[in-house]
Amino acid sequence: MRIHILKNYEELSKKAAEIIKSQIVLKDDSVIGFATGSTPLGTYKELINMHKEGLDFSNITTFNLDEYYGLPASDVNSYHYFMYSNLFDHINVSKKKVHIPDGEVKDVDKFCKDYEGNIAKAGGIDLQILGIGKNGHIGFNEPDDNMDVPTHLTDLTEGTINANSRFFDSIDQVPKQAITMGLGTIMKSKRILLLASGEDKAEIIEKMLKAQVVTTNIPASFLFLHNNVDILVDEKAASLMER
Ligand code: GLP
């Protein structure tokens, strides 16, 4: 696990975008796993600028980590809407190669199996981008006694519903469930890039890195078992870390 401490959010976003760019330059048909949340927004802005300067996304395939269950893709709070408005509508990605879990699907089990199958058919994820929840969740893999391995439907914790209510008009509108890649799906990625920014993330980053244990209480701690992980933190998120 490589930990990089960047001066601020802008530097973190630039570094993350550089890593994604190198991946695409090395392999133009890379399979990229995208994440939502406020953290990667700066990275996506950088990628849009890189596209304006010529970076070609036309051959990549994308798989998103998660989607709220019960929200149509057209809802402004859906992760579909987030990805198109913040990235995909501004780069030349082929819409046919974009995959985001379907928040309205009826046969969830079949959908999740197919999602896994489609990732495998694409050759696996070359680079997975992750944010981290304040409780250590990655995607929507919430702390629990057991962790689901493949893509699955999950209940959101109260803490996550509260944290994400800032995007909704009221907390009652926040979906209670989501479809998310499982920890196994994430761990199969060839390379992982986790981004953490701001004081809000300082506690969980310190807790996870100090403990050096793998625990389902901190789903992100499973990344200790992966051999190709970069963690990018800005100075605020690193403020409680021992240097
Ligand atoms: C959400 C997403 C995660 C994201 C996390 C942190 O619940 N499902 O993929 O990493 O919250 O979000 P933020 O970057 O806004 O802090």
Image: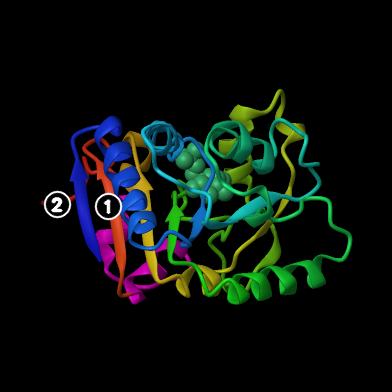
Q: Secondary structure at mark 2?
A: loop
Which secondary structure class fits the magenta region best? Answer: helix
Instruction: Kindly identify the residue that appears in the image at 56 percent across and 37 percent down.
Output: 163
Q: Are marks 2 and 1 in contact (CB under 8 Å)?
A: yes
Q: Measuring 27% from the left and 69% from the top, which residue is drawn there?
A: 212
Vertical side of 27 occupied by 76: above or below: above
x and y percentages locating residue 226 in the rendered image: 35, 74
Q: Is residue 78 shown left or right of residue 40?
A: right
Is any atom of residue 42 visible in this view? yes
Image quadrant containing the N terminus: bottom left
Identify the residue position indicated by label 2 in the image.
Answer: 242
Q: Is residue 96 or residue 12 the one in the foreground? A: 96
Range drawn in magenta: 204-226
Q: Residues within 10 Å of mark 1 (few under 14, many from 20)?
A: some
The residue that appears at 76% across and 54% down in the rendered structure is 102
Residue at mark 2 to residue at mark 1: CA–CA distance:
8 Å
Image location (x, y in percent) of residue 112: 73, 69
The residue identified by callout 1 is 206
| Residue depicted at x 51% and y 56% | 60
